[in-house]
Amino acid sequence: MVVSNAGQGDAAALRRAAQAHRAGGRFEAARSLLQRAVELAPLDPAGWALLADALLQDRRAEAAITVCDLGLQRLPAAPALLCAKARTLQSLSRVAEAVVLYRQALGLDPANAEARLGLALQAAEAGDWEEAQALVQPLGVAHSSPAVDWLRARIAQGRGDNDEALVASQRMLAAGGLLPDQRAEAELLMGEALDGLGRYGEAFQAFSRGKGALRAFYAGRASGREAETVKLNRLAAWFAAADPAAWREAPPAPPDPDRPGHAFLLGFPRSGTTLLEQALAGHPRLAALEEAPTLAAPYAELMTGPLGLERLARLSPGDAARWRAGYWREVDVRCPAARGSVFLDKAPAGTLYLPLIAKLFPAASVIFALRDPRDVVLSCFRNSFQMNALTYAFTDLTETARAYAAAMALAEVCRRVLPLAVIEVRLERLVDDFAGELGRICGFLGLELTPGMTDVAATARRRVVRTPSAAQVRAGLNRQGVGRWRAYAAELAPTRPMLAAWIERFGYDPDWGGASG
């Protein structure tokens, strides 16, 4: 049977209507229209790619991958579909797979802007501004889109040209035609450029405009789901009232010679986990996986309500074995090097997984990352994240502080109730005495400190130091990331009621007086 694109005109109209729904945050309406557009024009790769992007924006990444695969069955050489699948894989931390697809798309079409943009974004995330520039350069000045214009501005800012980044972001905003999330990204980038120029008050206003736009854009979706702060407080209250006796034991995990060690790197986003994970991953006997949903399935079944929590408290050996097997299958797919290595599961937002860790992996070690709460909250507020329940909280300054306080309260009660092996690591100490702190952590993990570990971290830090502000704040690897909150002390004042107790609890300077620079 021959399938044609006879309905392409109607499909194009549906896609335009769907884009209007997406701009208004009406994701389900957009998905429905895009599904109809694909049915009308199944040989048009743009329809499949837009449908996948809409699903991804609605946090339905697995469904987006399915759509891409269905489209690629019909159109295996469509760069737009390869790029759409790559974007989705990247959102799931499957970066290596995404790179393969971007390069495949670029091989099919060397001028393909989406493939160049995707690879350049990965280079920018790594602080490799020269590589990012080399990938974008062939597009020329004639090729302009919000995503490409934003990346050009970010590259300028990353290479230290804050003036050019400011002009470019202002030009993007003045041009109009941006979707709400694109406008938000431009505002956040403008804020980083202004921060790099020492114009902190203006920078904070830009951060606030950007996060305000994101909050409005995703408000409809957020209204039907449990807010992150509510979730964290609910769990903390449940464990505070729980009988500790039910949590003192866990179904034993049989020894596995292919799993010589297991650790989780937790805390709160922007607490310095990036530097630590990069350094630990430099050990020849350690494999690390970054921010993958390895515990999402057991969380969904066992921690979303009191009945599930009661089941978790009295987890049977059979259920524990089933969940462990599923976890390791997920790990082995995403990180094949984990087998035969000490495995580090990095989840900066994974504090709420502590009860699962205690029951499923009682022998696992927990590295808990800490940083001055004011720096954490500021960094969460000024940075861009893939949207979920927690990062939606980051669209409001005081809600960011409430989420931080709720996460720390949950961690405290879990550490009191659960038999966990925990080591605290402070970013400030790590920066001041990197080798000493890293040696202490290695000892906790049963590893020896090797030169490769400090070399990895030194390379990462040198890369960031060469490129100011955006990369510095994003990675948090240099001294400028320590005490950065003081430049915004006045703006952070509303968070004081939520953060003061944790500043005291963790031993940070309680003085809220600001200093410039």
Image: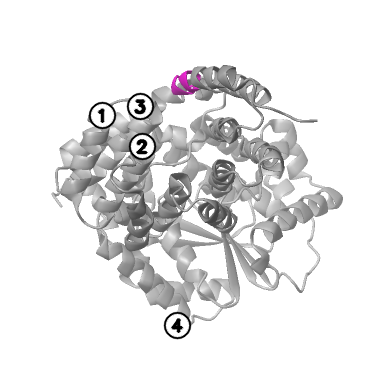
Q: Earlier in the sequence, mark 2 or mark 3?
A: 2
Of residues 433 and 456, which is closer to you in this image? 456
User: Mark 2 packing: few (<14 Cα in 10 Å), some, or many (20+)?
Assistant: few
Which circle, 3 or 1, is nearer the viewer?
1
User: Which residue is label 4 attached to?
Assistant: 451
Q: Nearer the viewer, residue 407 or 53?
A: 53
- Can residue 248 be seen? no
Label 4, label 1: how many angstroms apart (C-alpha)? 50 Å
Name the secondary structure under disc 2: loop
Q: Of the residues under marks 2 and 1, which one precedes in the sequence? A: 2
Badge 3 marks a residue whose secondary structure is: helix
- The residue segment tinted magenta is 19-25
Q: Quadrant of residue 61?
A: top right
* 69 or 317: nearer the viewer: 69
Disc nearer the start of the sequence (4/3): 3
Percent position of residue 145, x then y: 36, 37
Q: Position of residue 247 (x, y in %)?
A: 70, 49
Q: Which residue is mark 2?
A: 145
Residue flagged by tag 4: what amino acid is it?
Answer: Pro
Look at the magenta stretch and give its main secondary structure: helix
Does residue 12 belong to the magenta stretch? Answer: no
Distance CA(mark 2)–CA(mark 3): 20 Å
Would you say the residues marked 2 and 3 are in contact, meaning their CB atoms lie under 8 Å apart? no
